[in-house]
Amino acid sequence: MAATQYSYKVRDTQGRFVEGKVEAASEAAVADRLRSMGYVPLEVRPANVGLQREISFGLRKRIRTKDLAIFSRQFATMIDAGLTMLRALTILAEQVDNTELRRVLHGVKQEVEAGQSLSAALAREPGVFPPLMVSMVRAGEAGGFLDTALRQIAENFEAEVKLRGKIKAALTYPVVVFCLAIAMCIGLLVFVVPVFEGMFEDLGGELPVPTKVLVLLSQAMRYLLPVLVVLGIGAGWLWRKYGRTERVRNVVDPLKLRLPVFGKLVQKLALARFARNFGTLLASGVPILQSLDIVSETTGSVVISRALEEVKRSVSQGESVAGPLAAHDVFPPMVVQMIASGEESGSIDQMLAKIAEFYDEEVEATTEALTALIEPLMIAVLGAIVGSMIIALYMPMFKIFDMIG
């Protein structure tokens, strides 16, 4: 059997980590050789796999909420089945599909091997593991129910992914129709109208007003199109860079809630996220003030974040959670009353779960209603625009036929 080069990571007799490469017939042979040298093998893999991973890391794949949900669910199942935390991390670091998450989990595993707690290791990757997940893991470690905490994290992320998926599925068709309508209009103006423009010049005579307008738009579009493309790319880059900054969100988030049709959908989505995250944190044993801090960062709305700052001040002074919420229009009376009822009965986490479930259903129903309303309107508008352009193109032809007749 031909020898293969393997890379390895081991711990020596003094507890230090050592890395290297060696040729052997199999991974087991590498592990046996390392043990005979007094090392504790931590990881052995073919060297070319590592090279492939390094190359793939040049373009890092984004870690999505769905990836974290799958990781949390698998981690909880392994812990519940009796596997040690380190063994579970080792398996997951090799098996997860997302290559970037695989790289991060290798780092988390090494931190845990070095004596760090799991929550501390996760906190070292704030761009990957959100504060909600870190706090729930920390609470699970302190209370001895890490598997339950991980399962709750998975359920929270799965609910978030499911809700986003329903919204995307409902809005995909209108967005595609809208993009096709724009592309069709631009195509007519840039490629079709110039052909007819040449025919009109050959025929001579005075063009009808609608045809003149269409020809002028076509001529302007030849120069405006490159400018619009550059402006669109620039606007997208600026939004990607500055769209999540506090200054921009302070202006944009309140405007989202005032939108005539979509404002209610944005509000319901933010309330569902607030209730689900807040309830999950409280159910996991995270202190209420810390929970409020975390939730204010995860609602996706600066309006709710401001309200939660007042709630935090109220709770720190020994007052209720529901009281300050009533002063903000973004929280409907039903939400305030249910939270107040939960505080009185000592089951606020259960009430928040019911609120989240209610608004998840409301978001789904609102999205479906909007889609049912938007689809026929977009088709009618598209037909009117394209139809008007075609009629404007053929009006000179009708005029010539009338003259001949």
Image (spheres, rainbow, N blue to C red):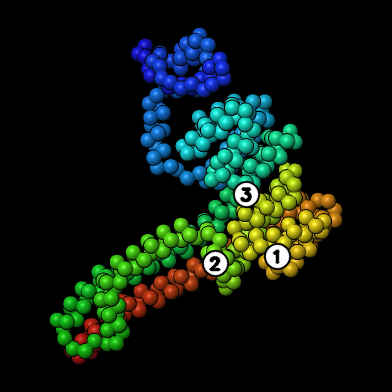
- Nearest the viewer among 243 and 366 is 243
The image quadrant of residue 363 is bottom right
Circle nearer the viewer, 1 or 2: 2
Circle nearer the viewer, 3 or 1: 1
Residue at x 38%, y 62% (from the top left corner): 234
Q: To which residue does mark 3 refer?
A: 159
The image quadrant of residue 320 is bottom right
Circle nearer the viewer, 2 or 3: 2
- The amino acid beneath tag 3 is Ala
Extreme right residue here? 345
Point out the image quarter for the C terminus.
Answer: bottom left
Residue at x 59%, y 38% (from the top left corner): 122
How many residues crowd mark 3 within 10 Å: few (<14), some (14–19), many (20+)?
some
Residue at x 36%, y 66% (from the top left corner): 231
- The amino acid beneath tag 2 is Val
**Image x and y of residue 139, in percent:** 71, 40
Q: Is residue 145 above or below residue 232?
A: above
Q: Which mark is residue 252?
A: 2
Q: To which residue does mark 1 refer?
A: 331
Which tag, 2 or 3, sits closer to the chain's start?
A: 3
- The amino acid beneath tag 1 is Phe
Callout 3: SS = helix
Which tag, 1 or 2, sits closer to the chain's start?
A: 2
Q: Which mark is residue 54?
A: none
- Nearest the viewer among 62 and 263 is 62
Which tag, 3 or 1, sits closer to the chain's start?
A: 3
**Image x and y of residue 386, in percent:** 35, 74
Give the alpha-carbon distance from disc 2 to disc 3, as whole Å: 26 Å
Extreme top residue here? 36
